[in-house]
Every structure is written in C-alpha cells, then in structure tokens.
C-alpha cells in the first residue's frame, strides 16, 4: 500500500469514530453553533480594530507638516 491509501484509510476511520461519538453525545450541533458565533465575534472585532487603526493612521498622515 502506498502512503495515500494508508492516509485515506486512517482519515475514514477517524471520521467514522467522530460520527459515532456525535451520535452518542446527541448535542445536535450546539458546540458548532457556539464556535461559529465566537469566531464571527472575533472577526467583527478584528474588522473594527483595523478600521480604527486605519483612521488614526490617515489622520496622523494628514497632520504631518511638510516644509
């Protein structure tokens, strides 16, 4: 067997185990929803921080006296 076949077999076994664990937990995807909401909040915060930094940089650049 080549490495790709072994990797694929390992990945399929892992996915099968995750599916069985998910069925046993029965959380209904609540953990995924929470994770997505948290990641979205961090992304929004990053966008706001970037906008603030860009505004401050532009203001500073406009206030620089040249000759």
Image: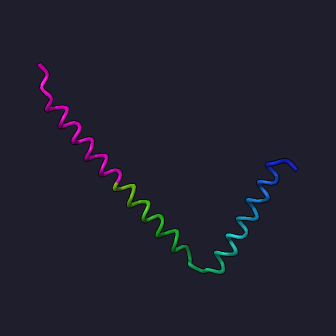
Q: Is residue 53 magenta?
A: yes
- Colour scheme of the rendered structure: rainbow
x%, y% of residue 16?
73, 68
Q: For residue 59, which quarter of the picture?
A: top left
Query: Is-magenta flag for residue 54?
Result: yes
Q: Give the main secondary structure, helix, strand or loop, of the magenta stretch.
A: helix
Total numbered labels: 0
Image: magenta residue range: 46-67
Q: Is residue 34 above or below residue 4?
A: below
* Image spot of residue 53 (x, y percent): 27, 44
Displayed quadrant of residue 11: bottom right
Which quarter of the picture shows residue 64?
A: top left
Is residue 28 found left or right of 34 in the rendered image?
right
Residue drawn at (44%, 60%) of the image: 39
Q: Residue at x 82, y 52 (%)?
A: 5
Position of the C terminus by quadrant = top left
Q: Does 40 sit above or below residue 63?
A: below
Residue at the limit of the structure toward the top, as seen here = 67
In the displayed structure, does residue 33 sit left or right of residue 56? Answer: right
Residue 20, percent from left and from top: 70, 75
Task: Classify residue 9 as left or right of residue 40.
Answer: right
Residue 34 screen position, x and y as percent: 46, 70
> At x 88% / y 50%, what residue is drawn?
1
Q: Residue furthest right?
A: 1
| Left or right: residue 23 compared with residue 42 | right
């Amino acid at each position: 067997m080549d490495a790709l076949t072994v990797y694929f077999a390992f990945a399929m076994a892992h996915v099968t185990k995750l599916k069985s664990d998910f069925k046993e937990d029965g959380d209904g995807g609540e953990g995924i929803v929470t994770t997505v909401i948290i990641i979205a909040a961090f992304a929004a915060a990053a966008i706001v921080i970037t906008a603030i930094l860009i505004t401050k940089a532009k203001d500073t650049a406009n206030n620089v006296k040249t000759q």
